[in-house]
């Protein structure tokens, strides 16, 4: 259960869509609100992508975020409706998330460091298949993977792009990461691996001039990468709130039995 307040101070934030903006105006008329820096809970109105943006932009404040779905998929969100918000928050279940830290070196020698809550994916930029060397904890596990790309997913992100790429669904409590190829050509039968959450993964792009590759951390893209290193940043902890009976762990379990 979430922390108990007499009456939590709420800050409402919304995606740019008219539907989300109208919902924010309505919620602010129904419930007292405060500026973001004074809030006990952030109520995010939008889709999964917007929620990830809010989590990243507010991570230094350590404020729990309660999402209401006004987007497309809404896997990380609660249903949107206006009634009994304080009661929903009082009964909400909290989930702690840790992001992946991606450090990318471009072909031009520039370093970029980005955090990702769902996954870090490497994707070919042209019609040419990518060639990628895969290292785990400083050991080369795949000298050459020919593919459209490869991704490393957190448990929370395992039902997103990872699942679409035929990767495994990971329970939140498993302390595992999913390493999943995207349309592998060689070795054709390699379907990926489950790694301990302490693993450090390094991708080295081969034939970079002929086969350029971009690295994407959730929605942040770094183009023309030469090497990408990824690990789970346990020092950063983010809190999501879910309605009782609608918790993320249950949805991840339920997703494994969907047909």
Image (tube, grey):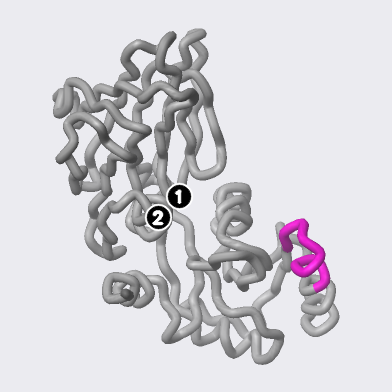
193, above or below 88, in the image: above
Give the quarter of the figure containing the N terminus. Answer: bottom left
Residue of label 1: 117
Residue of label 2: 157
User: At x 48% / y 63%, what residue is drawn?
Assistant: 239
Decide which of tag 1 and tag 2 comes sooner along the chain.
Answer: 1
Q: Residues within 10 Å of mark 2 (few under 14, many from 20)?
A: many
Q: Quadrant of residue 22?
A: bottom right
User: At x 49% / y 18%, what residue is drawn?
Assistant: 224
> Magenta stretch containing residue 15, yes or no?
yes
Disc 1/disc 2 C-alpha distance (Å) = 7 Å
Residue 157 percent location from the top left of the image = 40, 55
Give the quarter of the figure containing the C terminus. Answer: bottom left
Residue 221 percent location from the top left of the image = 54, 32
Taking the view exactly as shown, the residue that stands out farthest to the front is 127
* Of residues 1 and 232, the one drawn nearer to the viewer in this rendering: 232
170, above or below 77, in the image: above
Q: Element under label 2?
A: loop
> Magenta stretch containing residue 50, yes or no?
no
**In the drawing, does residue 153 fall left or right of residue 223?**
left
Residue 136 percent location from the top left of the image = 20, 31
**In the drawing, does residue 187 fall left or right of residue 8?**
left
> From which residue to which does the magenta span run?
14-22
* Of residues 181 and 63, the one drawn nearer to the viewer in this rendering: 181
Q: Element under label 1?
A: loop
Asked whether the beta carbons under mark 1 and mark 2 sit within 8 Å of each other, the answer is: yes
**In the drawing, does residue 98 fall left or right of residue 134?**
right
User: At x 42% / y 86%, what residue is drawn?
Assistant: 245
């Amino acid at each position: 259960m979430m922390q108990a307040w007499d009456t939590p101070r709420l800050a409402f934030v919304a995606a740019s869509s008219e539907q989300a903006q109208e919902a924010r105006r309505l919620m602010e008329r129904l419930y007292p609100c405060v500026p973001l820096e004074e809030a006990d809970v952030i109520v995010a109105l939008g889709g999964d992508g917007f929620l990830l943006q809010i989590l990243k932009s507010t991570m230094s404040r350590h404020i729990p975020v309660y999402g209401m779905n006004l987007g497309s998929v809404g896997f990380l969100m609660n249903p949107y409706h206006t009634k009994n918000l304080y009661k929903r928050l009082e009964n909400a279940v909290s989930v702690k998330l840790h992001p992946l830290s991606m450090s990318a070196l471009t072909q031009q020698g520039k370093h970029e460091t980005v955090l990702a809550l769902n996954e870090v994916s490497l994707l070919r930029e042209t019609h040419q298949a990518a060639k990628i060397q895969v290292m785990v904890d400083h050991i080369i596990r795949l000298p050459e993977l020919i593919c459209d790309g490869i991704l490393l997913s957190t448990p929370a992100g395992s039902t997103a792009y990872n699942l679409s790429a035929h990767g495994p669904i990971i329970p939140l409590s498993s302390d595992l990461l999913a390493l999943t190829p995207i349309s592998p050509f060689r070795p054709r039968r390699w379907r990926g691996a489950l790694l301990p959450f302490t693993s450090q993964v390094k991708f080295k792009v081969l034939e970079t001039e002929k086969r350029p590759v971009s690295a994407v951390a959730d929605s942040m893209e770094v183009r023309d990468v030469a090497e990408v290193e990824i690990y789970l940043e346990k020092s950063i902890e983010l809190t999501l709130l879910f309605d009782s009976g609608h918790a993320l762990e249950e949805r991840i379990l339920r997703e494994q039995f969907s047909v």
